[in-house]
Amino acid sequence: MNIVSMNIADKSVLSLFSEHDDYMIEFLGDDKWCYTRYSENENIENVWVVYYDNFPIGCIAYRKKADGVGEVKRLYIRNEYRGKGISKALLKTVECYAKEQGCNTLFLDTRITLEPAVSIYRSFGFNIVFQQGLYIQMEKKI
């Protein structure tokens, strides 16, 4: 496994983002109207891709939200590689980067119904700080 910082416009990144979007739209079913596919308007600053045998299997992105506050975006692992600790390795990569940038807080948005993701985030130290319906915001002090 190798985690590599990538250009946001890289073909591997855009392919993984598209897979992530497809997964989310399928998962949401009737609620897919509330999901927005990736666009440059997200202002993602950094993205990392994890490779296994030179094949991209997952990604994570980061953007600064305010002084001292960073946001975790687009964590995605291809289904056949889930459950192997890859998400935590990607979260650790973002956390280290955020600390280097002077951040003291990371947050992310997700849905409470994405139970495996919420479980990973909680085990990594994120706590729910806001909930509206199925939407939650989680935060971690770093």
Image (cartoon, grey):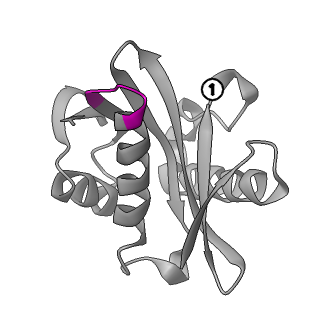
Which residue carries the number 1 mark? 42
As drawn, which residue projects farthest toward the bottom? 53
As shown in the figure, which amino acid type bears the numbered disc 1? Glu
Q: Is residue 139 above or below residue 124?
A: above
From the viewer's perspective, is 130 left or right of 36? left
Magenta-tinted stretch:
100-105
In which quadrant of the rendered view does residue 99 lie? top left
Q: Main secondary structure of the magenta part?
A: loop
Queried whether the magenta region covers residue 111, the answer comes back as: no
The front one of 60 and 29 is: 60
- Measured from the top left, where is residue 19 in percent x and y? 68, 59
* 134 is higher (above) or lower (below) than 19: above
Q: Residue 16, position in %: x, y?
A: 68, 59
In which quadrant of the rendered view does residue 129 lie? top left
Q: Is residue 104 magenta?
A: yes
Front residue of this view, candidates 135 and 62: 62
Q: Quadrant of the C terminus?
A: top left
Residue 28 as seen in the image, left or right of residue 7: left
Residue 29 at least partly seen = yes
The image position of residue 49, as x and y in percent, is 62, 60
For image coordinates 84% across by 56% down, the residue present is: 11
What residue sits 44% from the left and 59% below the top?
A: 90
